[in-house]
Amino acid sequence: MKQKNTELERFTYTVSHDLRSPLITVQGFAKMLRDDFGRNEREKVESDLKYIENGTAKMEHLLSDTLQLSRIGRMANPPEDVPFGKIAQEALVQTAHQIKSSRVEISVVEDFPTVHVDRMRIGEVLVNLITNSINYMGEQTSQKIDIGYRIDGEETMFFVRDNGIGIDKSQHEKVFELFYKVDKSSKGTGAGLAIVKRIIGVHRSRIWIESEKGKGCTVCFTLPVV
């Protein structure tokens, strides 16, 4: 109960903190809009409106991701036995446009085991991880993402590995926090890995990062294997 209360307090603080930023933007430019409109400065009015639109759009994305995170575990689909390879292929179809436009090379092993999971939710996990890898790929000419697994003792560990910019060890836990972003200028709200961790947790499994700054990143996770 103490752990749950701590998580709730952290969640509430994070949401209120991150929602306040676009609210301040909207409030500030609404005042500027009133002043610029009174002076009949049309170009500045258009600029003010654009900032207000961007602020409300950011708030909408933050609220949408927060709602998605809160629903995980309460609206789960019944788990089923499905080859993990099929889930991987479905995720690649969903991210096909991003993969093509980024020109990243994708490698997927062929002999995945069968898992007992919520198929749609684990598909969301892979879509988020693939998208994350693309967004943090860096400027190298040969961009690669590997989707695979390995056996570690009695445990089957799945992974999504890239050769991107990597993550410093000091941030391995932070990246799973809601709205946390390694690069503040990157795309998205920073909720992707928080959602991924929640989905993996619902499956009573675990997830972690293996990475060093400048040496790519591997996101590892376990799942119930049939």
Image: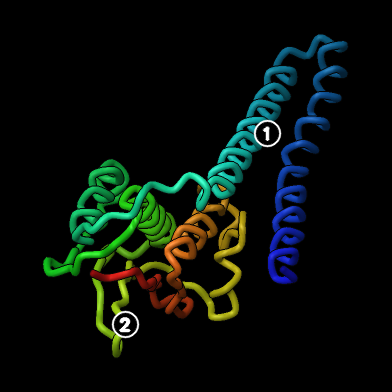
**Camera-side residue of 8 and 137:** 8
Q: Contact, CB < 8 Å: mark 1 with mark 2?
A: no
Crowding at dot 2, Cα within 10 Å, few <14 / some 14-19 / many 20+, comes out as few
Going by the numbered disc 1, the residue's amino acid type is Gly
Who's the residue at 70% across and 56% down the image?
A: 11
Q: In the image, is 26 to the left or to the right of 114?
A: right
**Camera-side residue of 144 and 14:** 14
Which residue is under mark 2? Answer: 155
- Outermost residue to the left: 110
Who's the residue at 31% across and 82% down the image?
A: 155
Up-down relation of residue 96 to residue 144 (above or below): above
The earlier-in-sequence mark between 1 and 2 is 1
Which residue is under mark 1? Answer: 55
Up-down relation of residue 218 to residue 66 (above or below): below
Locate the C terminus and report the quarter of the image it occupies: bottom left
- Outermost residue to the bottom: 153
How far across and down, in percent of the image, does residue 196 sit?
46, 58
Who's the residue at 76% across and 60% down the image?
A: 9
